[in-house]
Image (tube, grey):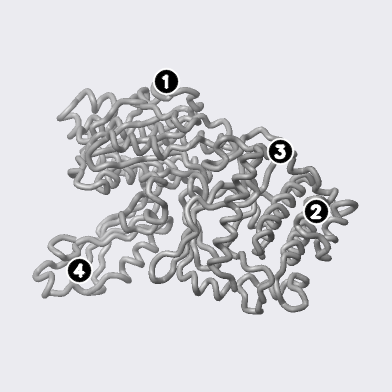
Amino acid sequence: MANSCTFLMGEDKKRKLEEGIGDLRRKKRKLSRMHYGDVPFIIGYAAAEARFRWFWLGSDEADVLDLSKDRSDDDRSDEYVKQHLLTEPTPTLPQSRNALDASLKSSTSIKLPVTAQCYKRVSAESPTLAKQCLVSTDGSHLPAFLSHYILESPSSASTEMSVTLFVSPALQAVFNLLDKFSGLRLNCKLTFNAAEADTSCRAVAVGKRPDTPGMANSCTFLMGKDKKRKLEEGISDLRRKKRKLSRMHYGDVPFIIGYAAAEARFRWFWLGSDEADVQEVGEELDIGKLVDRVTLLQNMVFVYRLVVQMARTVPQMSGRLPLFEKLERHSGGTVLILDNGMRKSIPDFERYSKDYETSFDAVKRAYAAAKAAAKEAAAQGRQPFMISATTGPQLEGRRKTYLVETTPLGYYKEPSTVREARALALACCETARVLHAEGVVHRDFRLPNVVCLGPCTSDEDSLGTEVGTSGGNDEDLAFLVIDLEGAAEEGAEVTPDCGLALASRDGVLDENGTFTAASDMFEIGMLLQSILRQLGAYHGESKAFVRALKRKELSALQALDHPWLRGLGN
């Protein structure tokens, strides 16, 4: 927009360019002569993956004309990637800051394919730079983008957003183009702080989320911080937001990549496995200078190759949750995965309470009990067995939006041994013990609501960061019960309309249609029966334990003292 009129419309799609073109045609409106006068058209574009088209959007509603040729058939970008950008095998991961620094600086030997026009303009300004760092090619997608970035000096950094919009989209474009034309299929997702009022930004407490997190294989491998003026502030924020790398999630990956940008200044960082290990690498760049924009693009190609190797190196976890990604819940709420836990939001909690037949008071009491239990477990050198809140729970605004931030962050893992099944049962029974002592029931002991933390032994970061280390055996794993938003007063009546569908689960409710502490134990029994049958271990003492739970013969305390569980948590 300019002078309060729209002069450009763009449609971006994840995969199909045709969908973007269709949306552009659908959203196009007739140009009002009162507002536009003699302006005969506005500019439109559609983009998907590495494909891009310009459009004439004329004064009539149906006047939409394609102005550019789709070059997907004769594009030579894949050839240029293999010849000039990814000519060597994927590098081994540097094991120290100095090794990364040297590798990043050596990336200036990469020759960037650019258009003939770009090569000519750079040669006129710096013949040596053009000869050493560029190669003249045609106007295929990859060289066209690289040429535009090299020749286009950034606008003045009037806001953090203007800095973000010059750095972050370039990273995403380089990663996407290399993905498309190299065949490596990293599928790295970069998320940008699109606006101060954007929900994806405001959904995280201040100081929790980097401006540009880059994720692949559901792990964060890149963190960026953009500032309006002082690079030092961006560096400080990067240090503050850095967390210790969990070996359970990152394995032998010794570092992730960081950057800070302000005005035209840019700096890369080594973000090591320890929380305080934040060190500068590479040269400080001035992206207002053509030569440094060339260097930045060369660095980005190298960083892409590093992230490919990182994504291949991390332990494979089918239940790993994607960091900083918002997940929709069937209840109508959302969950945002943070680096050390989750942030839950449920709009109109009063309606949610009616639909799920609970109350804010019951949920708040459940979290209060969980917090005390976490402190008790930490004092004993054990992992927590139930989720606890770092912020909230609380209700905000006229619509009573429910908000809570929880810790720690686990991952979904179905028990694969009897020992793991016992560890899961221990977490469930301990959670039931804590809640029942407060007159509250969980009401939703199902496999999706129990996550794995890693080793049973707690470390100093277990309440503040991702927990666990790699290399543990089956006997070490600890589990954590989550999702306390379904908790309710013990003995409350449950109707067939309850969102948890408790009335439809045979045997859960008592003869009066109420959900009691024994109902929780019944659910735990049903969960264990399913797991043990899949393991072929539903017999003997395990079968006797499950039957006692399903018959509602055991309280939580009695279950913890049963021979099948006794001593497991010590």
Considering only order in the chain, which callout, 2 or 4, is on the residue closer to the N terminus? 4
Q: What residue type is labelled 4?
A: Gly
Q: Where is residue 153 in the image (x, y as percent from the top left)?
A: 19, 40
Q: Nearer the viewer, residue 258 or 540?
A: 540
Q: Look at the numbered discs 2 and 1 and tell me whether their residues touch, using CB distance below 8 Å.
A: no
Q: Name the residue under label 2.
A: 532
Q: Where is residue 147 in the image (x, y as percent from the top left)?
A: 26, 39
**Residue in view at x 19 percent, y 61 percent:** 1
Work out whether 39 lies above or below 133: below
Which element carries disc 1, helix, strand or loop? helix
Q: In this view, does 341 lie to the left or right of 39?
A: right
Q: Mark 3 points at which residue?
A: 476
Numbered disc in front, either 4 or 2: 2
The answer for how far apart the CA atoms under marks 1 and 4 are is 57 Å
Q: Look at the numbered discs 1 and 4 and tell me whether their residues touch, using CB distance below 8 Å.
A: no
Q: Mark 4 points at which residue?
A: 58
